[in-house]
Image: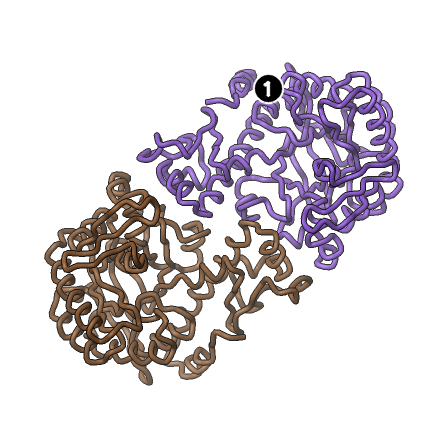
Chain colours: A purple, B brown
Amino acid sequence: MSKFFTITKKDLDTHARLGRLVTAHGEVETPCFMPVGTQGTVKAMLPRDLIEMGCQILLGNTYHLYLRPGHESIRRLGGLHRFMGWDGPILTDSGGYQVFSLGKMRKISDKGVRFQSHLDGSSHLLTPETVVEVQEALGSDIAMALDECIPHDATRDYVHASTARTIRWAERCLRARGAQNQLMFGIVQGGLFEDLRRGCVAAMTPMAFEGFAVGGLGVGEGEERLHAIGSFTVGLLPEERPRYLMGVGRPQDIIHAVRAGYDMFDCVIPTRNARNGTLFTFQGKLNIKRAQFVDDPRPLDETCHCYCCRNFSRAYLRHLYMAGEILSSQLNSLHNLYFYHRLMDKCRQAIRDGQAELWRELGKITDGA
Amino acid sequence: MSKFFTITKKDLDTHARLGRLVTAHGEVETPCFMPVGTQGTVKAMLPRDLIEMGCQILLGNTYHLYLRPGHESIRRLGGLHRFMGWDGPILTDSGGYQVFSLGKMRKISDKGVRFQSHLDGSSHLLTPETVVEVQEALGSDIAMALDECIPHDATRDYVHASTARTIRWAERCLRARGAQNQLMFGIVQGGLFEDLRRGCVAAMTPMAFEGFAVGGLGVGEGEERLHAIGSFTVGLLPEERPRYLMGVGRPQDIIHAVRAGYDMFDCVIPTRNARNGTLFTFQGKLNIKRAQFVDDPRPLDETCHCYCCRNFSRAYLRHLYMAGEILSSQLNSLHNLYFYHRLMDKCRQAIRDGQAELWRELGKITDGA
């Protein structure tokens, strides 16, 4: 059952592990970061630039693709890979996260979630069965089960009931699956309550999921609880299946989670921050809007080998941002995603070579300057 | 004096010629098209993609760069080439065209043009001397003299007086020049009046310009007069210096002008149309917004070898446009500029190989379907 995932090395000092995940569209070395391709494109990025930076796997958003252009349209066009010109592995989320973000525009029951489209107000029902059907139409390599992403300030009663429903939905997703060559991951909820997280893991690990995600974190609970509940939950999950921390996050969160034993990550931070002019370097973040860069001839990061840092100055990047040029989003996204991939390289290298020094260096990365 | 320009072949049936223009940043084979890099970037294009499609030379807008980030800032940063990461030839306009487009925000006198910045309303004076100074600070390979681009419906008296001033400004530009390694082109005005065009050419050809541009066309006078005055004027210009038809235009206009004897072109049409979803093919234009493309698995143009046509369907391009994705502008711009460069390839090939058949094929290109 776990032939699609092999742990190739375990770190001696932490819970970090090096792994190899085999999908229908190729192998992924873990720990890995998945750039988010919300509407069938990683914003402002050509697929070839993703390949060039060593990107191994993308995330696609089922909710957005279901509404526009529609999963049946994508199926007719040969599936999501061909549609977006990406031959490598793709993981699709279930659509649940976006639907739950709609607030008053959705209504939840055991059957599923009824919601109104943010595009045209039309009414739709997302059930465990439909999210499986949609993801099979998209033809992703890894599908996610339907879950409810619970607000961090929900009451214990709500978290308890919601998590029980997520468990029932997980079983229905597995019963509904029909696709060959598509892995399916279950999603562990349970909010900030350790016993509910434990109960959810206990209920789900006997199920035939090829991997597990931990959801409901990085949603406003704060760094301390994110790290605490994240570490607690990953410690309960079976070793031999891949573990995915959904939607998290900042570089320091990813490093913490890799050390705790997570294998997979996705987050919009690198691309969204890029479009807002916030750029990552191993010396800290940098806000390219600032007047201090107006005449700065240096590259963003003198240690970075990305196309942006090899060819352009901070002064030019500031100019593009101030002038509202599209190229600003292109170059900034390219750099930030390159940074995230280098970050994962460093994590894998630290595990592979048992480099305590590299772990210490990575541990110094913070969100601030 | 004309060692920087060599005519390598003349077409037997038309006035078209094949040439080689030598600049400080390399050679350009003419007839050539110059993508417009308004604010120090060809919108939505990485320089490496321009190189890959065979782009030989860019146009930079002096007006925009003067206002933001400022020519002194660009000079301090090593000049426009280094600033925008483009090692090849660059032609800069004089800034006059943009200033005259400002309408009531500018006031013209023999001294120059006083105008208010479209960015912050600040007041500036552009004179023949300052446009030379600014272009030398930018470090372009080809600088343009200051001219007034006359509205097509101006009275004969206005055109006469304005053209006389443009001639006086041309002399002042030449006197002001100091840069080595920078060519300077004069601009022929004269509106739609053949005798005034003739007078302007007669006054300017004795001047020490390395090339001549024809301005004031493609500004609303209509196709017939554009072609008539364009052909009339180019026929008056000296053979041994390059001839540049400014701001024109549509594929059929460029083909017409190549046959009339023009060597250089620039226009925002390929990039602006790209961002609006209008795409060029050798079978006609295509509006990617249209519902007919919703499930169309074909590339934009099956005969095109650009990155966009090799990897993506019309359905995908339509989806990107409808979803407002940045990648829409990137892929569409890439395709349209590739088309314009193929168009110039075909023109050069028709001249080089004396292919009457290819000229006939090119002559069928229209703006319509």
Q: Amino acid at mark 1?
A: Gly
Q: Which is nearer the eye, A28 or A284?
A: A284
Q: Quadrant of the N terminus of chain A?
A: top right
- Could you say where residue A13 lies in the image, as x and y percent from the top left? 64, 14
Q: Secondary structure at mark 1?
A: loop
Q: Quadrant of the C terminus of chain A?
A: top left
Q: Is B125 positioned to the left or the right of B171 in the image?
A: right
Q: Is A146 positioned to the left or the right of B13 in the image?
A: right
Residue drawn 54% across the image and 37% down it: A337
Q: Which is nearer the eye, A177 or A15?
A: A177
- Could you say where residue A181 lies in the image, as x and y percent from the top left? 78, 45
Residue drawn 56% across the image and 43% down it: A50
Residue topped by disc 1: A354
Residue drawn 78% across the image and 48% down it: A123
Q: Residues within 10 Å of mark 1 (few under 14, many from 20)?
A: some
Q: Which is nearer the eye, B22 or B278?
A: B278
- Could you say where residue B219 lies in the image, as x and y percent from the top left? 34, 69
Q: Is B156 positioned to the left or the right of B172 in the image?
A: right
Q: Is residue B330 above or below residue B285?
A: above
Q: Is A330 positioned to the left or the right of A134 in the image?
A: left
Whether residue A201 appears in this view of the structure is: no
Whether residue B74 appears in this view of the structure is: yes
Residue found farthest to the front: B104
Q: Chain of mark 1?
A: A
How many numbered marks, from 0 up?
A: 1
Q: Quadrant of residue A146?
A: top right
- Could you say where residue A48 lies in the image, as x and y percent from the top left? 55, 48
